[in-house]
Image (cartoon, grey):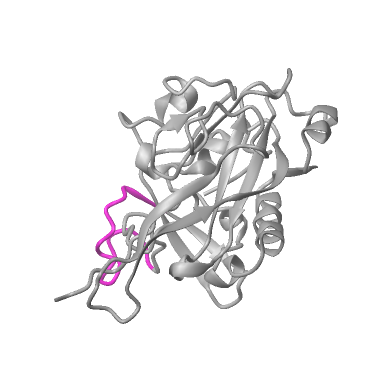
Amino acid sequence: MTIPTRQFKFSGMIAPQDQFHQMTTAALGAIAPDEHEIAPTTVNVIITTPPGVGTKGIPQYAAEVRGPSSLYDPAGDCNGNFMSSNYQPNNNCYAYGCNIASNSFPQPGRKSGYLLTSTDMAGTVETVGATVKSYAEKDGLLYVGTTMDEVRKYTPPSNTEYGHFVALMISPAGDGNWPGDYHWARCDNSTLTCDEWSQKDGSDQVTNFDFAGNLISDPSKANWTVNQGPIQPYKSQPNYNPDDLIVEYAFYCFMYVSNPSTTASVNII
């Protein structure tokens, strides 16, 4: 019997089985192995970190749309690009967090030439979080702190009319061949009490609930636990283990997205 490869659910990272969002090595319509690409546009980026990667093509399924407001409005946010009637599968938690529907399943740092690798995801919450945060900073996000008190006292730059806060959660590589992942949540009332948040879990729809179905008032205290299913469900395998793999995303920090409606502030792909 052929044992199928385990398929994890990711919030931010691109799953290996997701052929629609893998980087390519040539332009759209090129010869194999890139002829599988069906995206109407390929955006070329030059990856400088890690060294030796070079120019890659990023599949993009529609033109980028930037939201002028971070209010919780799934139907109208970025012209509805986060909803299933449009380009929901092509926008992850990072796109929603930044309020930029890049329609490319964007990754922190990639637009700036920094590529998250499996090595980056292998470590502690602190080490992995530091890397993801630094790559997001390359894209234009600003570090705020680790407490809601710091969020409420934060003074943004003067040119951030529509700026908003985001929260970064980290799940490092771990047991059951879990390769690691990250997740972002977005504040819906950044100019007020900062106690209303929402998120988009990978290719899923937007919601203002955490992973346990609770309204998000403070992402640092919310439930970010995911049941990935049985570790090894096949009794014929020597490593048979019917227990479910429970993956937890730990809060790492708060950041600030400066006026995403202008291309001079935050840029992602």
Residue 111 at x, y percent in the picture:
57, 54
Q: Viewer-proximal residue, 164 or 252?
A: 252
Q: Quadrant of residue 128?
A: bottom right
Q: Quadrant of residue 132?
A: bottom right
Q: Viewer-proximal residue, 123 or 268?
A: 123
Looking at the image, residue 144 lies above or below residue 3? above
Residue 201 at x, y percent in the picture:
46, 41
The residue drawn where x is 58% and y is 65% is: 121
Looking at the image, residue 84 lies above or below residue 111? above
Asked whether, in this view, residue 1 is left or right of residue 115, the answer is left
The residue drawn where x is 57% and y is 51% is: 249
The residue drawn where x is 46% and y is 49% is: 226
Looking at the image, residue 8 lies above or below residue 160? below
Magenta residues, dominant SS class: loop
The quarter of the image holding the N terminus is bottom left
Q: Which residues are magenta?
A: 26-42
Q: Most extreme residue toward the left, as rendered?
A: 1
Q: Most extreme residue toward the bottom, as rendered?
A: 238
Examine the rendering and report whether any part of residue 250 can be seen. Answer: yes
The answer to if 33 sits in the magenta stretch is: yes
Looking at the image, residue 228 lies above or below residue 1? above
